Image (cartoon, helix red, strand yellow):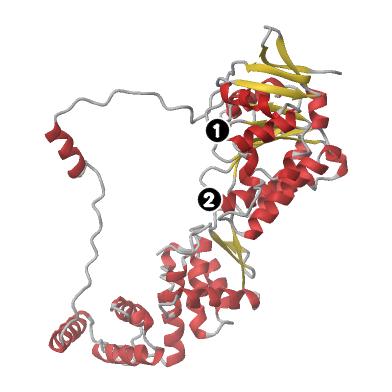
Amino acid sequence: MTVHIDMGDMAGGQKAGMDLEELLATRLLVQGNSGSGKSHLLRRLLEQSAPWVQQAIIDPEGDFVSLAEKYGHVVVDAVGTEKDLQMIAGRVRQHRVSVVLNLEGLDADRQMKAAATFLDGLFDADRSLWYPMLVIVDEAQLFAPAAAGEVTEEARRRSLGAMTNLMCRGRKRGLAGVIATQRLAKLAKNVAAEASNFLMGRTFLDIDMARAADLLGMERRQAEAFRNLDRGHFIALGPALSRRPISVKIGTVETAGRGGSPKLMPLPEQPKAEAKDLIFTPSEGEAPTPRFRIPEPATTGEVLDQLDVAGKEARDAVEPAENLLDYGEREEKIQIIISEILAEPDAAFQPIASLYQDFQVRCRIAKLAGGAPDLAVFREKLSVARAGVDKEEVDEGAWQQAELIAAELPDDMRGVYLLLAKAALAKSPCPGNQEIATAYGTRSPGRARWLLSHMEERGFLVCATDLRGNRIVTLTDLGWQTAPGDEAAA
């Protein structure tokens, strides 16, 4: 069955038809400067072919997510791990669902990795799932650059390999690449050369006009015609379009992107004095700019006065035990004392011996029944306190499992494990390196990263990174997993 889709009008007023079956076999390259109507062309192609063929759109700017409401495309946001995205791509081929891979909000490096992972997932599908699919890649020069840029070499290599597979080997797997670019000179030649159909829009640079003329079989002197094309007008050539270069005006579309061209609007009329107030006066509800002040160091006399006041308050607050066997409020008092110690500036970074010495003094001041616990008990309770765990907020049975696992770790690592267990149990974001370092008793984020690697090597946890660069920690023995969290978070 031959399916012709209407792309618009030719110069003579005839309809510009595109043979969809031929397109699936021969692929398409679209080129045009910003504002030439390139995205409009892709949208027309997608809308016209949506009832006939499955589609997958690699969308770096989120312009094509509007197709979802009218044409049923599923928007796949690039979140989670790369393994998740690859499995989603496999299900896309299995269930023949049209999708838009939304890469909006990711930096260039992560966009390349996400696109490569998704394309690899489509490419590696089982042979029984090789149904026809249009794979549209907007801004293809980002994913198949002609030269190395500011992205990492790993991301560039993976993305370029996935794009090469799509254009060179995708046809036998049912994948028909449709790539669009602003600059032919920035697009890898081995990717562009695999397309047999071309739609060339307005462009001004000599090098891009020369490459466009070469691809269309035009003479160099005819390349000047690309400068004079109106918006939405393209020169078409290829077995799915025309056997000779023809001018095509792209037709209208039914959906609209979220961007669009900016429209001129008059400035609001207001006196200069009021305009000045608008700039320099905070708006209602606007958060004030935080101002950080380095506190002045306290004198020795002030420190002694604070200790004297704290000791007096502690003595007044604690009721004396009726006898040595009265342990009713002992655990609660111990928790209060440890919390007071950790509330002191820099307490989290002091050696355990110094903290235990302070703890013993405070226990004597508080007249703790039975005396202060030994060092081993103090280490265990300090680990829980550093993790910031309130047992009333967590399931007691589940938390006992976490404490049993933590008991197998060295004393200084237990606090970190319990901190991660608390986040996983509450489905909270993974703590940042600074928070982990504080629970470990150091100021160094590097020590936090080393500690996680060490605990991963011993099989207590598994660290993964989602496509936005956020860390996810899975506690293997418990089967708990934290939500994605920024490791650089304060």
Task: Give the residue furthest to the top.
Answer: 13
- Find residue 91 and report its image quarter: top right
Q: Quadrant of the C terminus?
A: bottom left
Q: Is residue 73 above or below residue 58?
A: above
**In the displayed structure image, the side of residue 127 where residue 390 appears, left or right:** left
Circles 1, 2 touching at the beta carbon (< 8 Å): no
Task: Decide: few, some or many residues near mark 2? Use Cα within 10 Å; few <14, some 14-19, many ≥20.
Answer: few
- Secondary element under disc 1, as helix, strand or loop, is loop
Quadrant housing residue 214: top right
Amino acid at circle 1: Asp
Q: Residues within 10 Å of mark 1 (few under 14, many from 20)?
A: some
Pick the quarter of the image with the N terminus: top right
Left or right of 6 on screen, residue 436: left
Q: Which residue is mark 1?
A: 63
On the image, the x and y values in percent for residue 477 come to 64, 70
Q: Using residue 471 as the reference point, say whether residue 210 is left or right of it.
A: right
Q: Give percent across and percent down for residue 272.
A: 14, 33
Query: Is residue 76 positioned above or below 86 on the image?
Result: above
Task: Tell me which label, 1 or 2, sits earlier in the chain.
Answer: 1
Mark 1 → mark 2, Cα distance in angstroms: 16 Å
Residue type for callout 2: Asp
Residue 370 position by quadrant: bottom left
Instruction: Report the residue that reaches farthest toward the front.
Output: 221
The reply to whether residue 403 is in sight is: no
Q: Which mark is residue 107?
A: 2
| Residue at x-position 20% and y-position 74% | 295
Tell me: 260 left or right of 330.
right
Observer-nearest of 339 and 229: 229
What number is the disc on residue 422?
none
Residue drawn at (23%, 86%), measured in percent from left and top?
320
* Residue 19 percent location from the top left of the image: 79, 20
As helix, strand or loop, the secondary structure at mark 2 comes to: loop
